[in-house]
Amino acid sequence: MKIIHLSDCHFIDPTPKGAAATSKAHPQHTLQNVIADINKWQSDAELCIISGDLTHDGTALQYGLFASTINALPMPVHVIPGNHDARAALLAGLPATGCDENGFINYAFTHKGIRFVFLDTLIEGEDAGVLCEKRLAWLTRELATSQNLPVLIFMHHPPVAVGLPFMDSINLQNAAEFGDVISMHGNVKHIFFGHLHRPCHGIWRNIPWTCGPSSYTGQPLAMQPGTGLPDKAWLEPGYGIALINENDASVCYHVETVPNPKI
């Protein structure tokens, strides 16, 4: 099974006609380039999952632009919010998106014997994320009812420190509680997230995890506290390709970069 993983699209308002060019390409243009690459080389993927920060400001205009842009993808698209999103505006702009009984964008479905679980880690108005008591209760019920299926979790905020001091300060703030829930059930096979704007991989609580690249721009490696971002080139836009074994839900993950469009 082939899955496309996009993240951190950060759509802003459309560029007004006749506006002066900026030093960065518009995030719609970078995503359009990424989608063109997907459609050329990976159009046989069965799903596309976008792990948050669909927009930069969470406005209706930005969600409208985002929705019209992802319509160019040939496969079903599923999204979750990131810290730059707004829950109500996202649901209004992308009305097919699922949500739970409390209005959080938590939902799940089974595809070819694998349970795909989507988590809403958004705290409106804050950069860090959380899975509150209600959201953890939803996840507990979902994992219990899916006990006989392998589970893949998609979320925006990392539940693990990755060695980037600033980003580690705004990750999932109650990762221990989240970890206790998934460890209790034992059916989570992989965790995917975004937020970091750079691909990386690891293992946490004996569960492998993958952070996908940003379709907009990737952050250079900044591992020293208090020094800000280093004076080095930013990563090009990209996307992830997850090849998932249907027998055991094990994952092989590839990253493709796509050159920035000419401004």
Image (tube, rainbow, N blue to C red):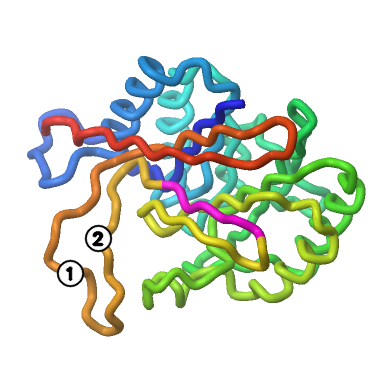
108 and 103: which one is in front?
Answer: 108
The answer to whether residue 210 is magenta is yes
Residue at x 41%, y 59% (from the top left corner):
196
Q: Residue 182: image x %, image y %?
A: 76, 62
Q: Residue 47: image x %, image y %?
A: 59, 27
Furthest-left residue in this view: 20
Which residue lies under the disc numbered 1? 230
Q: Secondary structure at mark 1?
A: loop
Residue at x 53%, y 46% (from the top left corner):
51
Q: Residue 61: image x %, image y %?
A: 42, 37
Quadrant location of residue 69? top left
Image quadrant holding the N terminus, namely top right
Q: What main secondary structure does the magenta stretch of the protein show?
A: strand
Q: Amino acid at mark 1?
A: Pro
**Within-10-Å neighbours for mark 2: few <14, some 14–19, many 20+:** some
Q: In the image, which residues are magenta?
A: 207-212
Which residue lies under the disc numbered 2? 220
Q: How many marks?
A: 2
Q: Residue 175: image x %, image y %?
A: 64, 72
Q: Earlier in the sequence, mark 2 or mark 1?
A: 2
Residues at circles 2 and 1 in contact by the CB criterion of under 8 Å: yes
